[in-house]
Image: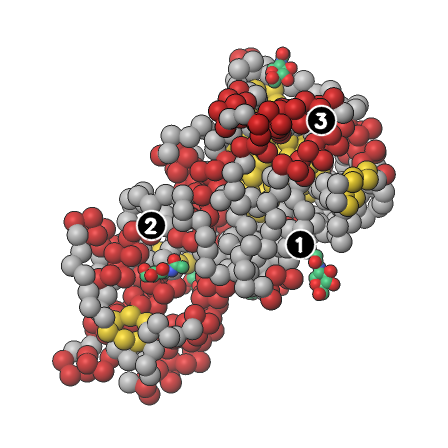
Amino acid sequence: MRGFGIASAAAALVATTSLFVSQVAAQNDVDPIVIKGSKFFYKSNGTQFYIKGVAYQQDYQGGGNSSSSESDDQYTDPLQVDNLKRDIPYLKQLMTNTIRVYAVNPENDHQEAMSMLADAGIYVVADLSQPGNSINRNSPAWNDQLYARYTAVIDEMSKYSNTLGYFAGNEVSNQPNNTDASAFVKAAVRDSKAYIKKQGYRDIGVGYATNDDADIRENMANYFNCGDQEDAIDFWGYNIYSWCGDSSFTESGYDVRTKEFSTYSVPVFFAEYGCNEVSPRDFTDTPVLYGDKMNDVWSGGIVYMYFQEDNDYGLVSVDGDSVKPNQDFSNLASQLSKVSATGTQMSAYNPTASPAECPEVSTSSWAAKATPLPPTPNQELCSCMYNSLKCVISSDVDQDNYGDLFGTVCGLGDGSQCDGITANATTGNYGAYSMCNSTEQIAFVLNQYYQAQSGSNQASACDFDGSATTKATQAPGATCSSLLQMAGSAGTNSVSVQPSVTGAGAASSETGGSGSGSGSDSDSSGSSSGSSGSMTAVPSVEFGILPVAFMATVAAVSGFGMLLL
Ligand SMILES: *[C@@H]1O[C@H](CO)[C@@H](O)[C@H](O)[C@H]1NC(C)=O
Ligand SMILES: *[C@@H]1O[C@H](CO)[C@@H](O)[C@H](O)[C@H]1NC(C)=O
Ligand SMILES: *[C@@H]1O[C@H](CO)[C@@H](O)[C@H](O)[C@H]1NC(C)=O
Ligand SMILES: *[C@@H]1O[C@H](CO)[C@@H](O)[C@H](O)[C@H]1NC(C)=O
Ligand SMILES: *[C@@H]1O[C@H](CO)[C@@H](O)[C@H](O)[C@H]1NC(C)=O
């Protein structure tokens, strides 16, 4: 309760004086967390840092319910001053030093909220996606729209000394046949890290939060950790729900997981835990997680979750200004009071683990090639390309119909007109324009087709029943010329240039969530993660629909396309 008083006083001070005060507070209040080897440390005194975390996001509509909405704002920014004022006292009773937030709005100013958390000694791990704009396991992409979202969140959150890290994805791949999606997530890790570096921000780690799926968990952990470390995760979050009720270290499989990660080269922690198959939850795993058997390998964990909602994982019930802790809350508090992991001192720690070997592509178990990864989104390259085209999509074609048109155009001839926009993580073939938006992509293929026709045929080749139309082209400037030249006329070369466009101001996305993408299933040893369903990526309409529609329609409509022409 004392902490609450301090936090309120700080908030009041900020409100009544200048921004300067809160800036100073935000920058000085906490010691940033740094990574060395597979452990976290307080930067200035080198004490090891164990995450004592709580997932903190209300009404997060990640699941199938978002299909009807056209808006991408299906989430409420969890970092709100009034709510934090209400909740921080309870988080402190749980000895919380970290909260995980799944979707923050980068257009909001989080100065005061982050200051209040800092005053309470609480760090934040933020996911970079949001429900309407995240990597979809069924038709994965890493594109301009996602890049704008990720970098906008990085721009906003990197200002605060209590930002502990970012998640570039949460439970995207969940079975062998969608492991190709992990290539796009790893590209997101790579580009988020490069962006932090390029902007000169503090060295904040970028990780991934994985599903505990028996078929893919080892390959997943290895894939994200292997190869060039500029592309690899800085930490690994493990969402695990295999300790239910009165379980044990061995029965839960925690023993095997611990062994698996005992040689991992970056920090690993539970990014969500707290099975609710037996209720109330007694959290008998908590002292084990921070105890001798596990605390040399794991950096603590994040309990799922603060708010009681339909999925029944809440530690408290919130109604307006009132907070009612439930039995889980007191059980967790009592378990945490037994925890006293001290770990090792940074200066005394000499990491020896090296990165894992990359998994090989295999039809039955792993579908993502380790290199090359998907290209870095580059909006400038895409608009240079678009501006150079003579034949584009008519503005009156609804985006919902792009899929059919892709099918038609790509089904013509040998299909090579589409090489510049395809992305295949299993073969490692990525067109330079595979990260562009769908308007640019469809225009690119229409134009490729158009350019390939000769003489009198050409006049009628930019039509497709009125779907395509010719436009004036702009002479490309020097930058565009050089970018376009790198991509090559077929768009099949790789363009290895960091985008010059940053996240700021580019955060808004055009479309909202569509249908599925939310996988609640997890075949962890004897348990399923009920929470992950509400927390998983929902695909965006525009980018979600393309590859699926594309594959499905190529065969069906290519004949029709032939007739048309
Ligand atoms: C190191 O700093 C942290 C945060 O300021 C503090 O909680 C911890 O107790 C310090 N360690 C020691 C050994 O003083
Ligand atoms: C999802 O929609 C159904 C039916 O409209 C509703 O009963 C359910 O409560 C919704 N779930 C959430 C998490 O909002
Ligand atoms: C992927 O595999 C699962 C079973 O592991 C199966 O149910 C699903 O239909 C498969 N999906 C595709 C697209 O093949
Ligand atoms: C998609 O690309 C076109 C052409 O570059 C551009 O005009 C349009 O604004 C882009 N759409 C979005 C949502 O960014
Ligand atoms: C990638 O290419 C392989 C080999 O051509 C093919 O079997 C697979 O279906 C392709 N994957 C996607 C997602 O298109």
The disc placed on residue 533 is 1
Q: Earlier in the sequence, mark 1 or mark 2?
A: 2
C-alpha separation, residue under disc 3 versus residue under disc 2: 45 Å
* Whether the residue under disc 3 has CB within 8 Å of ligand 1: no
Image quadrant occupied by the N terminus: top right
Whether residue 75 sits left or right of residue 379 in the image: it is right
Helix, strand or loop at mark 3: helix
Q: Nearer the viewer, mark 1 or mark 3?
A: 3
How crowded pointer 2 is (Cα within 10 Å; few <14, some 14-19, many 20+) is rated as many
Q: Earlier in the sequence, mark 3 or mark 2?
A: 3
Q: Nearer the viewer, residue 482 or 178?
A: 482
Is residue 265 shown to the viewer in this render?
no
Q: Nearer the viewer, residue 337 or 7?
A: 7
Amino acid type for the residue under numbered disc 1: Gly
Q: Nearer the viewer, residue 509 or 329?
A: 509
Whether residue 215 sits left or right of residue 458 in the image: it is right
Amino acid type for the residue under numbered disc 2: Asn
The disc placed on residue 378 is 2
Coordinates of residue 476 in the picture (x, y in percent): 18, 56
Is residue 87 shown to the viewer in this render?
yes
Whether residue 469 sits left or right of residue 260 in the image: it is left
Residue, disc 3: 4
